[in-house]
Amino acid sequence: MAKNSNPVRGTRDILPDEMEIRDRLESKILDTYVKHGFQRIETPALESLDLLLDSEGGENLKMLFTILKRGEKLDLHSEASVTDICDIGLRYDLTLPLSRFYSNNQQKLSMPFKSIQIGNVYRAERPQKGRFRSFKQCDIDIIGDDSWQAEVELIDTTAKALNQIGFDDFTVKINDRRILSGMILGAGYSENDISQVSIILDKKDKIGKDGVLAELSQLSQGITAAEKLVSATESLNVEKLRSGEIAGGAAEDLLSTIETVEKLSGGKYEIVFDPTLVRGMGYYTGMIFEISYGPYGYSVAGGGRYDGLIGKFSKDSSPAVGFSIGFERIVGIMMEEEKFVGNNGKKLALLYDLNDEFVNVIEKADELRNSGYCVSVIKAKKKLGKQIGQLETAGFEYLWVYGRDEKELKIGGNNE
């Protein structure tokens, strides 16, 4: 009996046509990041389970993929906990690995350190459209800069990367966890409630205002505090920031960021203050931001400041802020809207016969490659007309039959 050839649920195989699009997009995003002074690093997909569980990763900690201990370390018994039987997990984002990486390598890095990470992360969540258990993120982070200018640089660079791959007219939503925490305390909640209340507020896009009120009302402060908090978040706007109604450095930094990004946007995108924006990660300490696009009910990029996370790995903490592009969602939107940017080169099929000297065929292919073509050497079939139709369907633009043609022929075009 043949084995099931389907990929693991929540993962998928990627066919050549989509892979070509993914490679082009990733290359353009990476090129933008590098041109803005960021440096690429790589961290392992595996991290210590102790570090993962102590990372303030919010709801993501419920979706960890964990790995069993090996040999004598594995102690199975009826009351064994996850940490008794597992000591390693797959990373759920790229921020925690970066924090550990920086703590381990900071003596070798320049300050401030501007990093690029592009790689897959893993979450054991319920698969749905645009959401997988293994998916790629494209992150840039700045470590060692506690000023609001770092946020501006991240937003500006991420926006330019999206512009470069064909995205315009998106919206950057921005808020500050310090302002949000102040509203939570002002509504009657305690310091210990801030994390739980923030997680509930973060569900507003999924469960709506009534759902948020229902969940908040289950806390000890009841419906009165819930209604006060929701009302406060809905009434706050950028005009109140400008009027000074919201006092303090957080409001000043947030307003400076908004006004600066507005000037840099050139009308290609919009930045708005969204006091209901939360972001689910518990490690965020300051400004947070997301990018939404079109009619899609999810963000395509997100991030924020996490000044306390590096201190978990080192006695000396460092300010840090990051922004991540959700690559899978970007690819899905671009394929749905057929928003493809350029290509990897002119694709040419070089057809040969078994009687041809294969060394000469390869040398001809290299000559064409040096002229700017992406050349695939393919054995000619007896029914050449049918084969040419298949090549056109496969995306080949040009044809050269070795030993017959004196120049490349445009498939499906006029070659006179």
Image (cartoon, rainbow, N blue to C red):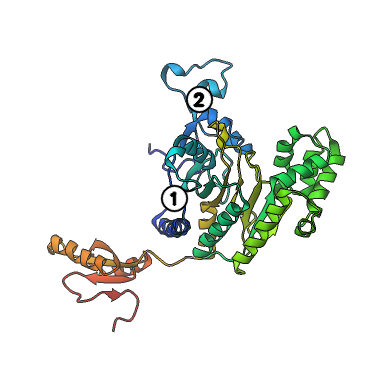
Question: Mark 1 or mark 2, which has the lower sequence index?
Answer: 1
Q: For the N terminus, give its image quadrant.
A: top left
Q: Secondary structure at mark 2?
A: strand
Front-most of residues 263 and 267:
263
Disc 1 marks a residue whose amino acid type is Gln
Q: Are marks 1 and 2 in contact (CB under 8 Å)?
A: no
Q: CA distance from mark 1 to mark 2?
A: 33 Å
| Up-down relation of residue 305 to residue 87 (above or below) | below
Disc 2 marks a residue whose amino acid type is Cys
The residue that mark 1 highlights is 39
Q: For the C terminus, give its image quadrant.
A: bottom left
Q: Position of residue 351 (x, y in %)?
A: 23, 66
Q: Which mark is residue 401?
A: none
Q: Position of residue 397 (x, y in %)?
A: 34, 70
Q: Position of residue 27 (x, y in %)?
A: 42, 58
* Mark 2 Cα shell of 10 Å, populated few (<14), some (14-19), many (≥20): many
Q: Quadrant of residue 34?
A: bottom left
* Mark 1 Cα shell of 10 Å, populated few (<14), some (14-19), many (≥20): some
The residue that mark 2 highlights is 86
Front-most of residues 60 and 287:
287
Let me know if residue 100 appears in the view: yes
Q: Quadrant of residue 380?
A: bottom left
| Up-down relation of residue 386 to residue 102 (above or below) | below
Front-most of residues 148 and 377:
148
Tag in front: 1 or 2: 1
Let me know if residue 44 appears in the view: no
**Drawn side of residue 138 relative to residue 294, left or right:** left
